[in-house]
Image: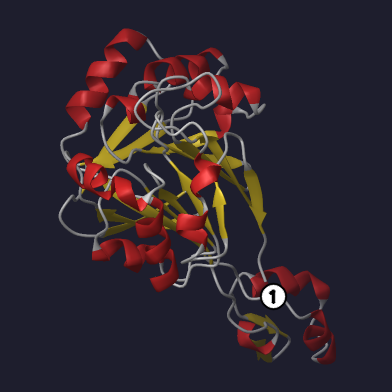
Amino acid sequence: MIDVTLIGTGGMMPLPGRFLASCLIEYNGKSILIDCGEGTQISLQKGKFSMCKIETILVTHCHADHVSGLPGLLLTIGNQGRTEPLYIIAPRGSTKYINSLLIVCGYLPYEVRIAELHDTKPQEFEQTGFKICSIPLKHHINCLGYSMELYLKPRFLPEKAKALNIPVNYWKQLHSGNSVKVDDTVFTPDMVLGDTRKPIKISYVTDTRPVKNIQSIARNSDLFICEGMYGEDEQKQNAMEKMHMVFSEAATIAKEAEASEMWLTHFSPSMAKPEQFINYASDIFPNVKIGKDLMKTTLKPD
């Protein structure tokens, strides 16, 4: 099971009831945090999340509302006794900005490993059990969107193993994809495993104008989290100038990508009640929710 929580849903500056846009993805005792603006660790504490379980921080871009919370978070993690390395993955050119922020941390009892990704083409890598794909977005500085896929092993079918008289002590090896030999008979995994299972997919996109690449990573997402800086279509010109999206543009992407569900996030401070504008999205893509701080869902395999 994968737990997905919006740690914050605001853009530009934190508000008393809305922290800056960030997302936590928890799986198998470890976590991936996407972005870390001012106050992120406060919201994490409100949600009673273990910050020591954060293994990787994916940065969309280095505007202050997405990275200024890093020093405080990393210091807190250090004070909680972490010694294992922590990975920060960000767009090309981000290392100098992140290292500048980390100067105020002084000594950390663990290593921070920073890796930069292409900002002109998609890049795939694995982290914390997920296959992750990054894509370049269209913003004022280098900016990335991410998709995370969890590939699941086929289910083990004990009735098939029993019918073949395979001893129980060999079942785990077969489920792990290894063949076993019992006496003079070789048993292969396909003899006792079910069909290939659909991966669980989460996509996260913020601070961008609509670009074709977004559809590629959002395609068939179980959950597509997308920015909706402004609600009304009348704000589209403003969104274009500031390199953001309105609700209807995000919803169109979700529809064309055939996502199962979409959450809107990264709301303008001027939009006090984004839920008032949900029809601009729901008229295009019905299965949409207005993101709220600490809104959570659990994605379960088929």
Q: Quadrant of residue 112?
A: top left
Q: Residue at x 72, y 76 (%)?
A: 156
Q: Residue at x 57, y 16 (%)?
A: 80
Q: Quadrant of residue 81?
A: top right
Near mark 1 (Cα within 10 A), the count class, few <14, some 14-19 or many ≥20, is few
Above or below: residue 53 compared with residue 285: above
x, y (%) of residue 155? 69, 75
The amino acid beneath tag 1 is Arg
Left or right: 145 in relation to 271: left
Q: Residue at x 43, y 22 (%)?
A: 110
x, y (%) of residue 134? 31, 54
x, y (%) of residue 117? 23, 47
Coloring scheme of the render?
secondary structure
Q: Looking at this view, is 106 or 216 the one in front?
A: 216
Q: Is residue 179 visible?
A: yes
Q: Residue at x 44, y 20 (%)?
A: 74
Q: Is residue 109 visible?
A: no
Q: Which residue is mark 1?
A: 155
Q: Quadrant of the N terminus?
A: bottom right
Above or below: residue 168 compared with residue 64: below
Q: Quadrant of the C terminus?
A: bottom right
Above or below: residue 75 compared with residue 34: above
Above or below: residue 32 compared with residue 284: above
